[in-house]
């Protein structure tokens, strides 16, 4: 039986080289989270529905962790299908990465994409220095990217207190001896440096400036970052297909009011060509290999319905979308607050699944 890594699967998907991706989990598992374009046929039903699978297709099978997909691929091989199992399944898919970069003023922005979860982090560098925004716990990835550019990591920042994935921010800052910044209003159980009014990277003539923009709404301590006046890292405040979910259902109206104010206070005065770079993407957003995923602010102004709403309508709509955090999100928040002491391997299982930090329709 043949197998393939999730990294190789991603490469094939990006190159349109996957003709048939067969997800053999239960319908409930599939509906909760799946790879775009996959076809669901539970393993127990597979022997009775082989006629649904094209004989000429190269079939890639996937499940939660790899066992069911291996059984499915073996069964298909016995029935003379061309079948390959995806090692590690969706759990491994949650940790498959790629990256792309763009030049903005005197800075280079590297967008680090955790493709299976739709989570983005960023390395911004110039003149031998860089800062890392919203890192995952894969610390070596950021260290290697910085080293490949000849940059020293001088600052690590989180745009907000994350609920859908574990933050590697404090650990990365400690590992490389960098400053760690987080919005003061986040309810954490550890000390951290106050968010500065301006961050400077590199020395003249390569000096670049990053302006933190306090943006309560998704969380009370949310921060966006304006890079060289030309790119806006929006965290979970503004997405390419929606806006941040007011993060506490019991304070939804207050948070929605804050969110409206934050978005318009910081974006209304910006030029249409400012590049919007979010911390997450939803399923409808296409990612192109080697190309940064972002859009000019002007496009969002005319195509994103929430940005066209008056305050009252926005608050009514956004607050109606607020829901209690899923149990795994609550545990992740507690871990990121410094309130949970557990082995990293145990906590990482909480991350498996999609991000649900946006509200995307009106």
Image (tube, helix red, strand yellow):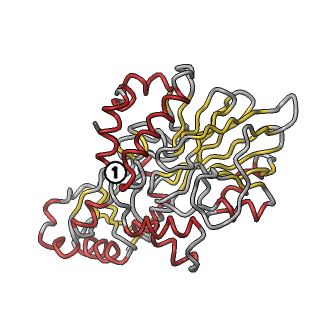
Q: How far across and how far down the image is residue 159, in percent?
A: 59, 48
Q: Is residue 144 above or below residue 131?
A: below
Residue at 57% x, 25% y is 274
Q: Position of residue 138 (x, y in %)?
A: 62, 63
Crowd rating for badge 1 (residues with CA inside 10 Å; few <14, some 14–19, many 20+):
many
Q: Which of the pair 338/35 is nearer the observer?
A: 338
Q: How many marks?
A: 1
Q: Quadrant of residue 224?
A: top right
Quadrant of the frame with the C terminus? top left
Q: Quadrant of residue 338?
A: bottom right
Does 257 sit above or below residue 39?
above
- Relative horizontal placement of residue 89, taking residue 30 as reference (left or right): right
Q: Residue at x 80, y 47 (%)?
A: 151
- Seen in the picture, residue 229 relative to 332 is either above or below; the reply is above
Q: Is residue 171 left or right of residue 115?
A: right
Q: Secondary structure at mark 1?
A: loop
Residue 232 image offset from top left, x and y in percent:
58, 34
Q: Position of residue 2 (x, y in %)?
A: 40, 70
Frontmost residue, 286 versus 234:
234
Q: Which residue is mark 1?
A: 322
Q: Is residue 298 above or below residue 225?
A: above
Quadrant of image for the N terminus: bottom left
Nearer the observer, 253 or 240: 253
């Amino acid at each position: 039986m043949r197998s393939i890594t999730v990294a190789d699967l991603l490469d094939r998907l990006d190159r349109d080289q996957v003709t048939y991706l067969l997800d053999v989990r239960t319908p409930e598992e599939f509906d909760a989270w799946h790879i775009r374009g996959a076809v669901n046929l539970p393993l127990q039903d597979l022997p009775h529905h082989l006629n649904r699978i094209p004989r000429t297709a190269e079939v890639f099978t996937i499940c939660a962790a790899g066992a069911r997909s291996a059984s499915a691929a073996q069964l298909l091989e016995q029935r003379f299908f061309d079948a390959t199992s995806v090692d590690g399944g969706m759990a491994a898919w949650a940790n498959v990465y790629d990256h792309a970069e763009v030049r903005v003023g005197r800075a280079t922005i590297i967008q680090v994409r955790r493709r299976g979860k739709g989570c983005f982090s960023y390395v911004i560098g110039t003149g031998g220095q860089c800062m890392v925004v919203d890192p995952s716990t894969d610390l070596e990835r950021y260290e290697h990217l910085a080293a490949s550019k000849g940059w020293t990591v001088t600052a690590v920042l989180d745009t907000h207190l994350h609920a859908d994935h574990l933050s590697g921010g404090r650990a990365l800052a400690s590992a490389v001896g960098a400053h760690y910044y987080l919005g003061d209003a986040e309810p954490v159980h550890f000390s951290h440096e106050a968010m500065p009014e301006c961050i400077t990277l590199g020395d003249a003539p390569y000096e670049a400036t990053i302006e933190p923009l306090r943006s309560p709404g998704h969380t009370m301590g949310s921060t966006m970052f304006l890079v060289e006046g030309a790119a806006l890292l929006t965290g979970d405040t503004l997405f390419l297909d929606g806006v941040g979910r007011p993060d506490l259902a019991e304070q939804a109206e207050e948070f929605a009011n804050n969110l409206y104010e934050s978005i318009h206070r910081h974006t209304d005065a910006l030029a249409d060509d400012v590049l919007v770079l979010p911390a997450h993407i939803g399923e409808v957003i296409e990612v192109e290999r080697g190309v940064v995923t972002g859009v000019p602010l002007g496009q969002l102004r005319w195509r994103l319905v929430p940005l066209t709403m008056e305050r009252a309508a926005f608050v009514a709509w956004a607050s109606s979308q607020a829901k209690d955090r899923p149990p795994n999100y609550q545990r992740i928040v507690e871990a990121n607050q410094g309130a949970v002491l557990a082995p990293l391997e145990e906590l990482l299982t909480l991350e498996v699944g999609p991000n649900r930090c946006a509200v995307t329709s009106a």
